[in-house]
Image (cartoon, grey):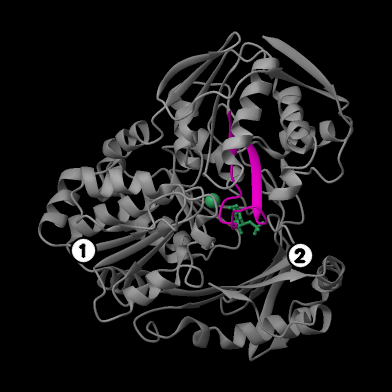
Amino acid sequence: MTVTTIATQPIAGQKPGTSGLRKKTPVFMGVHYLENFVQSIFDVVGAAGKTFVLGGDGRYFNDRAAQVILRMAAANGAARIIVGQGALLSTPAASHLIRLNKTDGGIIMSASHNPGGPHEDFGVKFNMPNGGPAPEAVTEAMFDRTTRISEYRIVEAQDIDLSRIGRTHLGDMVVDVVDPVSDYATLMESLFDFDAIRAMFARGFRMRMDSMCAVTGPYAVEILERRLGAAPGTCVNATPLPDFGGMHPDPNPTWAKALMDEMFGPAAPDFGAASDGDGDRNMVVGRGIYVSPSDSLAVLAANAHLAKGYKAGLKGVARSMPTSAAADRVADALGIGKYETPTGWKFFGNLLDAGRATICGEESFGTGSDHVREKDGLWAILLWLNILAVRGESVADILKAHWARFGRNYYSRHDFEAIETARADAMMADLRGRLASLPGAQIEGMTIAAADDFAYTDPVDGSVSLKQGVRILFADGSRIVLRLSGTGTEGATLRVYLERYVAGPDGLDRDAQEALAPVIRAAHALAGITRFTGREAPNVVT
Ligand code: G1P
Ligand code: ZN
């Protein structure tokens, strides 16, 4: 085996964001681009003698990038790589394999819910030995490395055949090609009551699972149709394609419109679900009723004990700061811990590792538990199915009963995408500069009670994360949060999170946008969104 050391130069802007390094595919395919970042990963975490998991969501360049990463791992002295067949692994399945095999971490090739293809997005992220995303200190060190890199190592070799399960070698390095689905499916079987779900399907329960031509297709077919007996054809768009069939694999009402139309149409099945590019996000929909991710987290937390993996109860519930407070009300009622973390799954890792939280969620269609260290789309869908099977009620009935008991946190997120970065920064700077003067002010008939820039001190390791988003809290419990996305690849994306609490039993059954109208108007007025960005309305509303 010949190891070649190739001279290279730093490439500007290889800064990993909320979930790894994400760029346009042609950028990633550029000379030395992927290689520089992968070498920087190995330089920071060390490769000699180590075992890593490797897989991705199947998007364009996934297969080529996997071969490069394998050759570089061998050249850097890695002992063993466990790679999903076809270089496929969903993010939660990769997290599970890292933990199950007690490896030194893993490399996941994905740009999550961003479109894929020769002109769309690609990404690479590193997950730690606990199965979770690399913390900021590690990604910062990787970034620092990319700014000083002068060479990378790669072996000269033929491509490894990743289509066949089994063990091969690349020089001294062992390459184990594994079935991407089976270990994950076994884990799901250990957490959920498959017999009860199977019986529900046998009684005629109908479901639609839309994998959006991304990685969860094979997982959904195996688990839902083969192991749980859902009718053949329950899973649609179930073959992962390099361009996701032209779909935007982001499971929300805008991008999973076909599913929404079906669930609100005359022949709607009992339950609908969709997942994103790499399988960590989920959207659930009942017949004629949409479940917001914040409500989904709260319902799952309130009912998790109905599934065998959680029958001992939850240790705590964690949510990202912009996620609605619905889950907090459940935590209070259960008398368990509640945690509010910055945006990004990595902040849940310490709480899960320390046994403080069992279930976590974000408003951005991410829900998960301590079974892995990533959010997990199919996990959430299966927990919903388990709850539906035990309770024997419809999604609508379960949601309405939940709101009647806990009250309803009307909630919506408005995204203003591809804004000129300078304009978005100016708006946030202006707003931050005025925060101290806001408390006491009246707007839209509401009084501002507090305004701050969210700062988080990790209760486990004491690390501090500043400037995590502007919060404006009103005396009536309503809330506005504004922050800029850390995952966009074009200009800046402004996210405006809107929330209003209504206690039952009256006023629980309104349209969310209508119920939130005064809060939306207040957000525009307080931040000057149109004045700064030129935008009057959001591009995506979830
Ligand atoms: C977005 C979501 C965030 C999620 C992240 C990775 O990040 O808002 O909740 O953790 O994607 O999936 P953002 O673009 O807002 O920084
Ligand atoms: Zn994702």
How packed mark 2 is, by other alpha carbons closer than 10 Å (few <14, some 14-19, many 20 or more), is many
Q: Position of residue 357 (x, y in %)?
A: 47, 43
Q: Is mark 1 within 8 Å of ligand 2?
A: no
Q: Position of residue 188 (x, y in %)?
A: 32, 40
Q: Which residues are magenta?
A: 106-125
Direction from residue 267 to residue 352 in the image, left or right: right
Q: Single out the residue that lies furthest toward the front.
A: 158
Q: Which residue is mark 1?
A: 206
Cβ–Cβ below 8 Å for labels 1 and 2?
no
Let me know if residue 147 is in the magenta part.
no
Please name the residue shown 40% across and 24% down the image. Answer: 165
The span from disc 1 to disc 2 (Cα, nearest Å) is 41 Å
Q: Which residue is mark 2?
A: 492
- Residue type indicated by callout 2: Ala
- Residue type indicated by callout 1: Arg
Q: Position of residue 467 (x, y in %)?
A: 77, 56
Please name the residue shown 51% across and 55% down the image. Answer: 244
Whether residue 354 can be seen here: no
